[in-house]
Image: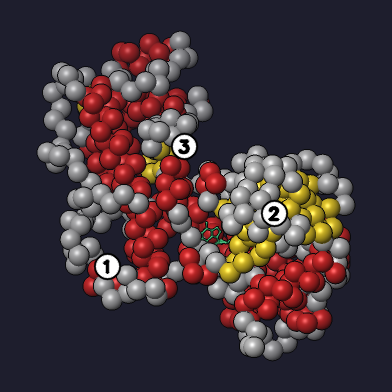
Amino acid sequence: MEIDDFDGKSRVFIDCLQQNGTAISPKIGLVDLRQRSAGRGVVAVQDIAEDEELFSIPRSACVLTAENSSLSSDIVQQVEDPWFSLILAMTYEYRLGQASKWHPYFEVLPAEFDTLMYWTDQELAFLQGSAVVDKIGKQTANQTFAEKITPIVRQHEATFKAEHLTDDDLLALLHRMGSTIMAYAFDLESSTQPSKSEEDGWEEDSDAGTISPKGMIPLADMLNADADRNNAKLYYEEDKVVMKAIKAVKMGEELFNDYGPLPRADVLRRYGYVTNNYAQYDVVEIPLKLIKEGLTKEVTTENVTLLPSELESRLEYLEQQGFMDDSYDIALVSNEDGQMPEEFTTLINALTLGADDFAKLKKKEKLPKPELTREGAQLAHCVFLDRRNQYPARTGDVGSYPHDEVVMDTRTANTRTGRRYQMAMSVVNGELAVLQEAIDTTRKLMAGSDSKRKVEDSPTDSPKGGKRQKT
Ligand SMILES: C[S@@+](CC[C@H](N)C(=O)[O-])C[C@H]1O[C@@H](n2cnc3c(N)ncnc32)[C@H](O)[C@@H]1O
């Protein structure tokens, strides 16, 4: 019988882990979930009790870190950032091929990704309107690799077996390792602490500013995640890391780790998939620029337009008070942190306050209350409508969306572009749903307002997508 390469690789990977001291409960199995585009995953093959150990992995023998790699520490120390040292170590081990003890591990790690870094410009256009498009950071990554990693690899070409790698091949390899770290690596705790964060046991974005060592933990990273279906957790002990069930799991159920309360846009950016269970965390980013534009364009305070100099002075005061940001995340009403952040509502209220009232508050070094006033609701409403206009107009009819011609043949088929289109639509529709709720909230707050300013809006306030699909 022909051995399925996929299953064969899984078996070799598991055998290798066990030979290196990993203890794996007979109650779990590494399975093929490609049918639902989820790669490999871990499932319970028998009922599992709460707190039961699922596997235990020796740190030094199995966890792939810059320290555990056989890459010379002199080379590793040429970079300070834990991301880069892990990228270097992984590039080195990968280039060793079968000579690397992690070769069976690399065989089960992905060679291709659906993360946004890998989307074509045409595919990224499906996400038009979403702020996620500006967070991919491909240019920055290219530049950082070129300045910090490539010179080291080139300096030690024989060590990295990179003599015959073109610059383009090397860049692609570095991206592959970087993307693997983004979706698979863990921040390593040094002792008996639980995972670095209660909400996210996985690699943090670089902008989070954490500098703890990074590591690839085989098998632990074969667990998928699905918002609140989390039923397993990784514990860090002195010499090993241990995955345990955090609730009873029935035979046949999948074991899920926790990637954190991420909006679908970020799940897509970092992990290359989306599920509806993450919809509860969706947000829309409102740039400060749009608020300023909304204000100077349309809103009046006590029916007097705020002069640019007065606007700047108010913004300066809010900055001093720590209420300024480049953008503000608006969430669903049901979001446990609230629909609109206080920084946003306070800013909006402050910008729509009459000159005398603002002067009084400022004198007392105070700020307006965060509950949106009617004037504030008017400005917010206008800003939300402007934000909605940044998404392409849609009627919901097939053939009406700007990209329909491009994807007509592929969007329902299981092609790469088709899948990406569907995922992008989940993100965009989710963000439009968030915006619609925000528009509804501000409209309610404005009701009964005696303001003379007319708020431009369509009679129904329906989203640009017409009938909003439930994502
Ligand atoms: C840490 S790995 C989990 C193991 C992975 N499935 C594999 O085959 O290697 C994270 C990746 O798994 C996939 N993934 C995780 N959770 C998923 C889910 N609920 N549905 C679909 N794919 C998922 C995504 O491709 C993600 O980038």
Residue under label 2, please give it. Answer: 186
The mark nearer the N terminus, 3 or 1, is 3
C-beta proximity under 8 Å, tags 3 and 2: no
Within 10 Å of the Cα at label 3, are there few (<14), some (14-19), or many (20+) other Cα atoms? few
Q: Position of residue 60 (x, y in %)?
A: 86, 60
Label number found at residue 325: 3
Tell me which residue sits at (19%, 43%) in the image: 462
Label 2 crowd (10 A; few <14 / some 14-19 / many >=20): many
Q: Quadrant of residue 146?
A: bottom right
Residue at 13% from the left image edge and 23% from the top image edge: 452
Q: Amino acid at mark 2?
A: Phe
**Residue 9, image x, y percentages:** 68, 77
Which residue occupies 73% across, 42% down? 51
Residue 52 vertical placement versus 396 (above, below): above
Q: Quadrant of residue 398?
A: bottom left
Q: Kindly identify which residue carries mark 1.
A: 403
Under circle 3, the secondary element is loop
> Disc 3 residue type?
Asp
Q: Is residue 218 left or right of residue 121?
A: right
